[in-house]
Image (cartoon, coloured by chain):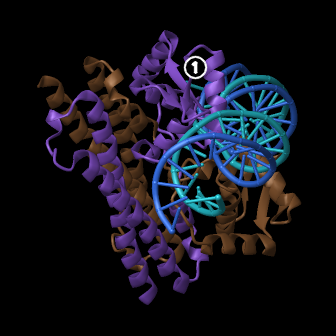
Chain colours: A purple, B brown, C blue, D cyan
Amino acid sequence: MAQRRVLKYAILGLLSKQDMSGYDITSEFKKAIGQFWSAKHSQIYLELKKLLTEDSISQYIEISGVKLERKMYTLTSKGKEDLKSWLLAFEDHVQTEKDVFALRLYFLKDIPLEEIPSLFENQLRLRNEKLAFLNDQYAVYFGEENNPIDLNKEELGHFLVLTKAIAREENYIDWLTTSLEIVKQNGRK
Amino acid sequence: MAQRRVLKYAILGLLSKQDMSGYDITSEFKKAIGQFWSAKHSQIYLELKKLLTEDSISQYIEISGVKLERKMYTLTSKGKEDLKSWLLAFEDHVQTEKDVFALRLYFLKDIPLEEIPSLFENQLRLRNEKLAFLNDQYAVYFGEENNPIDLNKEELGHFLVLTKAIAREENYIDWLTTSLEIVKQNGRK
DNA sequence: TATAAACATGTAATTAATTACATGTTAGAT
DNA sequence: ATCTAACATGTAATTAATTACATGTTTATA
């Protein structure tokens, strides 16, 4: 996928919350936001280097312990502008949300009937694991607070993204469950 | 994204239904299956060339009209094997389903409150357009037939993928609608 | 009969992303 | 005192994907 430099803006957005190192950014992609965008550390370090030369971010060093250097990054005013104009741009089309399992199912006729249930069950297991992780995250951050009116703007962004991820997994699991039933019924006819 | 050669298997899967040209394959990605995987013609022609050298497909020429050459591709037995083993492989993790709109919302705090409704409305418009397209497709292929038990295996794959795409859009639209309400309420407090 | 839209195939340049290679530090547990 | 997991940063090679460049045919319609 070559969406135009989405990683750039993902990094700028994260840095607009607080200064971070490349490692911190990598870690963020393992949490809620990683459900909607992610990148490997190798790509992140390269993008940070590029953002530095473009003056969208600046760097300073923090020492951890005795001599471990953490390179911290801060948004410059140019970086803030870049981020803001990206956030306000209208999308003119929705890009394909790629999904390999759905692609495979399209080719159902080439899968022996007896293999199908275990493929579904494997996918259900993966999806349920992910849903459990997301529900845990919800409990940690919004467990007590179930009225989103009280959240501040930063928490609200997190809340919306997390509820989206949960809704998406629940919807996926529903579809898997009903589809497996349909396939079983169909095979029996 | 560098999922290991998914395009290869998408092409093999399409060719397992019937012989196709590169143009035909490009066209398929504008229909149901394009909701879950897609590629530009430039990438498709390159992949076809690669599949030829790997002996997963073979080629013959069909003439359209007077002299327009359509290069048609057929699965070889190796191609059939490749496809089958890919279809049976278990996934060991679910990859990030990237979504730029959700990513942006995570950075909500940097969007001026008055700009938010039009961003949502734009997204709702795009999603409703897509849903309308999918419902049209459903009407064309399964309009009368609403009992999937009667479908043959090839139709069933199509049915499952199309209902998945519809469920996904409906779920997206629900989330957009409730989230817009939450944001409006939150801003008023 | 002109012309536009759809049909049809390709390459080149560039960007995005992954996998593998490579190295070193720190904190906590045994 | 040793060891392991987590912390921390980078580069090289390769693959995947897009955008732009490039050309020609056929069909329907105005």
- C16 or A15: nearer the viewer: A15
Residue A180 visible to the viewer: yes
**Residue at x-position 54% and y-position 41%:** A26
Label 1's element?
strand
Q: Is residue B50 above or below residue C23?
A: below
Q: Is residue B86 above or below residue B26?
A: below
Q: Quadrant of the C terminus of chain B?
A: top left
In which image quadrant can residue A129 be found? bottom left
Mark 1 highlights which residue? Answer: A59
Mark 1: few, some, or many residues within 10 Å (few <14, many ≥20)? Answer: some
Which residue reaches farthest top? A77
Instruction: Determine whether, in the image, residue D1 is placed left or right of residue A171.
Output: right
Instruction: Determine whether, in the image, residue A163 is placed left or right of residue A40.
Output: left
**Residue at x-position 79% and y-position 47%:** B46
Q: Is residue B98 above or below residue B163?
A: above
**Residue at x-position 36% and y-position 33%:** B105
Q: Residue B11 in the image: x percent, y percent?
A: 69, 59
Q: Residue B64 in the image: x percent, y percent?
A: 78, 50
Instruction: Determine whether, in the image, residue C19 is placed left or right of residue A104.
Output: right
Q: Residue A95 in the image: x percent, y percent?
A: 51, 40
In which image quadrant can residue A18 be found? top left
Which residue reaches farthest left? B189
Q: Residue C22 in the image: x percent, y percent?
A: 80, 46
Chain holding disc 1: A
Residue A91 visible to the viewer: no
**Residue at x-position 77% and y-position 65%:** B74
